[in-house]
Structures are given as structure tokens and as C-alpha cells.
């Protein structure tokens, strides 16, 4: 019998901890702490195949769980990768900080301390010229992946500052990250982060996992590929290519955004096939989803779509559902559904996503008018031909 969950703790009525990194849509630490407290036992393995900035990895380490996180976005992956450094002894961390500081000071000493972080320009790349120049020098100056990771995270933090002098801001960002690294609790089972598509989760694991805790992107998701894009391109990432593999991304279908709904169903089905191969028998799948997304004003129920695919998949039990609600920075109440299912068998193997996408679009058609209705009708006719998002594949550089 699975544990019943308390609404107040799901909603994190009393929030006392903050995330280390800034990343839109990331889990609240206390929320994940409660899920792991309720459903995981020390020594078990937990997987987050859409790990974002690594909250599940951070909390898994504190629960003495072996955590593995997969992430397609290189910026979020770098943030999640930071928590893998919890496996280093304090002396090794001090050595890492020392090596990074030496390199940072060598490069920043070559720049005018009065140089601004950003210049006045409506063009982002022109305004960020100073930051990008120093970033190019820093990232090219080392092949040590851990040093490069600390430098990149420092540059992310500096970019988010938006003002001040270049050298002082980058140095402050590095000192903040260094202090956080030294404070990170030591873990004998340090979490692992991999730059990987969630739909390839079964290829990324080395052992079956006992628990999957994750929050997939939603339909018409925020364009995450724009975050720190210029810095990531210095490392060779084609962020537009990354965007084409993001689940729910609307960038792929600007001509008809309702095609995103079809592709989302296909991508989630692929992900569930992979998750079923990752989980041990009776292992738990916990998926957290925003209840509703809108495409050109038409509502689509993310959690209902995913719940249907889980239930019909064959490898999972009928999902239990819990509700949580929180207030975002704009003062809006955001409702999420927590779907919990057990691995009970093997996939049926039939194509479930296309018929579901057709039903969802047919219902949407009834509430639409004008060119929106025309677009939905066009999308309906394309259900048989739409392909899943291309699988992301990029060698790890951090």
C-alpha cells in the first residue's frame, strides 16, 4: 500500500529552503524531500530523466539515495552536474577552487576593472560583448572539466546579475559558487548528471532504478533554449538544434502550433517506454505536471494526457493522482497534478499516442473559431504523419 500524501506538505505551506540555482519551473526542495521521505528507502536508486537544475539529485544525496539525473538543456545540465561534486572530499574541493581561482584571476587581470558587465544596446550579443569576451578566454583556457564547470556556472550567475562591472561581478559569482561547493554535504553516493534525452533513459542507466521522480515539460513550454544561449554556444552547442528535441517546445511548429500537441503525445509515449525499461518490478513512477497549457488560447490538459498514456501503456498500474497548488511570482495560483504509478508489467506495444492526440484535438476543435479552428483541423489531418521530436545527441563537454 502506497503512503497517503499530506496536502500542506505537497503545497510546501511553510517554505524554508531555496534552490541554489535560478531555473524556471524547478522543483521546490521541500516538495522533493517529502516525496523521497514518503516513497524511497535509504540505499535505493532514484532517477530524474528531466532533471532541470538538479533538485532531485540534491535531495537524493541527503536521503542517502543513489541519484541519476538526465537533462537535455546544457545550462540546466551544468547546474545539476554541480551536485556531483558532493562526492569530492573537502581537500579535493579546496584544490578545485584553488585551480579555478588561479585561472580566473589570471584572465580577469587582463581586463580593465571599470569595464561594465553589459553595454547599452538593444542587441543582446552587442550588449554582452564584454562578458562573452572574458567567457571565451576562460572556457578556452582549461581542459579540466570540473574547473570549466565552476567557471561556466559563475558566468551564468554573472549574466543574471545584469549590472555592475565585469571583473567584480564575475569574481563575486565565482566566490558565491566556491562557498556553496565547500558547504555542500559530502556524499559517498554522489549523484550523477548526464547530458541525455529522457527518451533514452534506458540507455543511460547501468542498473535498474527503484524510483523515478520527474516533471516533464508541458505543451507549449517556455523556450528554455534561450537561457544563457550565447555562453553555451561558446562551448559548441547549437541551441536551436537542442530546442527541436525539447518536449512541448512550440518553436518547431510556428506555422501551426497545434502540431505541438501531437508531437507531445508521441514524445511522452516514447519517454514512458524508456521509463518502463528503467524501473525495477514494482518500482514507482512519479510524474508532476502543470494541469493545463494553452495553445493560441485553447486549453490542453497536460496531466490528463500523460495520465491516459500511463494507464493505457501496459507497464504501469492505473496512476493515483494528488493535487498541489502554489502561487507564482505573478501572484497566480498554479495547479499541478502528481501522478504515481507502479511498474507492473511490459508495454502493450501498440500506438497509443496518435489516437489520443486525435481525440484531444477533436475536443479542442469544438471550442475554437476562425483561423484557430482551421489550424486545429489542419493538425487533425496531420496526426498520421507527424513524427516524434528528434532524439538529442551531443557529446558531453563538462
Image: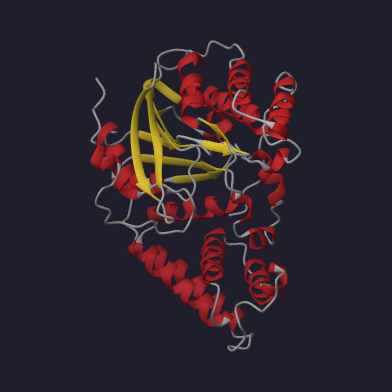
Q: Quarter holding the N terminus?
A: top left
| Quarter assignment of residue 117 | bottom right
Q: Quarter holding the C terminus?
A: bottom right
| Quarter assignment of residue 281 | top left
Picture coordinates of residue 135 (x, y %)?
A: 64, 70
**Horizontal side, residue 258 vs residue 76: left or right:** right
Q: Residue at 71% across / 32% down in the picture?
A: 370
Residue 60 is at least partly visible in this image = no
| Colouring chosen for the image of the structure | secondary structure
Picture coordinates of residue 177 (x, y %)?
A: 44, 67
Q: Nearer the viewer, residue 368 or 205?
A: 368
Q: Residue at 67% across / 30% down in the picture?
A: 369
Q: Nearer the viewer, residue 91 or 226?
A: 226
Picture coordinates of residue 125 (x, y %)?
A: 71, 68
Q: Residue at 65% across / 58% down in the picture?
A: 229
Q: Nearer the viewer, residue 174 or 127?
A: 127
Amino acid at each position: 500500500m502506497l503512503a497517503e500524501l499530506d496536502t500542506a506538505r505537497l503545497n510546501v505551506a511553510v517554505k524554508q529552503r531555496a534552490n541554489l540555482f535560478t531555473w524556471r519551473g524547478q522543483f521546490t526542495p521541500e516538495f522533493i524531500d517529502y516525496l523521497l521521505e514518503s516513497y524511497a528507502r535509504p540505499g535505493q536508486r532514484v532517477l530524474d530523466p528531466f532533471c532541470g537544475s538538479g533538485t532531485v539529485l540534491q535531495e537524493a544525496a541527503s536521503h542517502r539515495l543513489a541519484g541519476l539525473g538526465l537533462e537535455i538543456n546544457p545550462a540546466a545540465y551544468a547546474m545539476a552536474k554541480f551536485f556531483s561534486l558532493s562526492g569530492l572530499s573537502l581537500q579535493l574541493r579546496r584544490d578545485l577552487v584553488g585551480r579555478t581561482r588561479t585561472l580566473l584571476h589570471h584572465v580577469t587581470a587582463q581586463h580593465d576593472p571599470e569595464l561594465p558587465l553589459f553595454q547599452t544596446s538593444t542587441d543582446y550579443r552587442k550588449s554582452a560583448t564584454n562578458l562573452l569576451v572574458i567567457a571565451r578566454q576562460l572556457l578556452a583556457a582549461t581542459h579540466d572539466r570540473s574547473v570549466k564547470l565552476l567557471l561556466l556556472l559563475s558566468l551564468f550567475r554573472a549574466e543574471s546579475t545584469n549590472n555592475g562591472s565585469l571583473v567584480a561581478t564575475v569574481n563575486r559569482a565565482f566566490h558565491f559558487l566556491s562557498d556553496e561547493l565547500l558547504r555542500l554535504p559530502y556524499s559517498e553516493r554522489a549523484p550523477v548528471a548526464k547530458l541525455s534525452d529522457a527518451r533514452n533513459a534506458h540507455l543511460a542507466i547501468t542498473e535498474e532504478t527503484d524510483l523515478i521522480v520527474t516533471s516533464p515539460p508541458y505543451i507549449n513550454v517556455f523556450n528554455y533554449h534561450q537561457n544563457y544561449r550565447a555562453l553555451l554556444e561558446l562551448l559548441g552547442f547549437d541551441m536551436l538544434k537542442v530546442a527541436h528535441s525539447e518536449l512541448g517546445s512550440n518553436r518547431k511548429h510556428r506555422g501551426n502550433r497545434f502540431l505541438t500537441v501531437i508531437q507531445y503525445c508521441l514524445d511522452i509515449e516514447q519517454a514512458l517506454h524508456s521509463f518502463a525499461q528503467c524501473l525495477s518490478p514494482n518500482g514507482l513512477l512519479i510524474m508532476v505536471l502543470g494541469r493545463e497549457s494553452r495553445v493560441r488560447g485553447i486549453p490542453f490538459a497536460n496531466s490528463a494526457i500523460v495520465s491516459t498514456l500511463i494507464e493505457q501503456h501496459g507497464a504501469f498500474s492505473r496512476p493515483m493522482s494528488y493535487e498541489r497548488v502554489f502561487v507564482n511570482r505573478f501572484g497566480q495560483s498554479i495547479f499541478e497534478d502528481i501522478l504515481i504509478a507502479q511498474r507492473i508489467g511490459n508495454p502493450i506495444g501498440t500506438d497509443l499516442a496518435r489516437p489520443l492526440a486525435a481525440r484531444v484535438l477533436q475536443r479542442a476543435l469544438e471550442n475554437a473559431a476562425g483561423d484557430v479552428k482551421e489550424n486545429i483541423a489542419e493538425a487533425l489531418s496531420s496526426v498520421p504523419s507527424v513524427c516524434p521530436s528528434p532524439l538529442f545527441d551531443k557529446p558531453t563537454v563538462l
